Image (tube, rainbow, N blue to C red):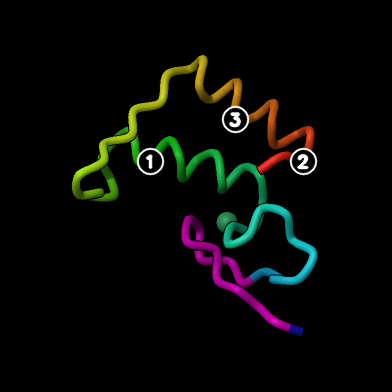
Amino acid sequence: MLLAKCPHCGTKTEFEGNEFRPFCSERCKLLDFGAWADEEYALPAETVELTEEDMAVLEHSAERGER
Ligand SMILES: [Zn+2]
């Protein structure tokens, strides 16, 4: 079994069959996207700003299992 550490909360989670990898859950994935908007992560060249609308779209596509 391959365990991956969630970049958001640090929880070790199974890598295989995890559609939210490298995150442990949809929640962490979405929260991490949100963190980019807060510039908690310094991303050079590309600034990601998510509005509530964007978050809704992300949430929706995640629910439908899209990438
Ligand atoms: Zn997590």
Crowdedness of circle 2 by 10 Å Cα count: few (<14), some, many (20+)?
few
Q: How far is the residue under mark 2 from the one under mark 3?
A: 11 Å
Q: For the residues marked 2 and 1, what is the alpha-carbon distance in whole angstroms?
A: 22 Å
Residue hosting label 1: 35
Q: Quadrant of the N terminus?
A: bottom right
Q: Which residue is mark 3?
A: 58
Q: Is residue 25 left or right of residue 51?
A: right
In the picture, residue 16 is in which quadrant?
A: bottom right
Q: Which residue is mark 2?
A: 65
Residue 23: x and y, percent? 59, 57
Look at label 3 and name its amino acid: Leu
Residue at left offset 76%, top offset 33% = 63
Residue 50 at x, y = what percent? 41, 26
- Membership of 6 in magenta stretch: yes
Residue type at mark 2?
Gly
Circle nearer the N terminus (2, 1): 1
Left or right of 63 in this view: 5: left
**Amino acid type of the residue tagged 1 in the rendering:** Ala
How would you rate the neighbour count of disc 3 (Cα within 10 Å): few for under 14, some for 14-19, many for 20 or more? some
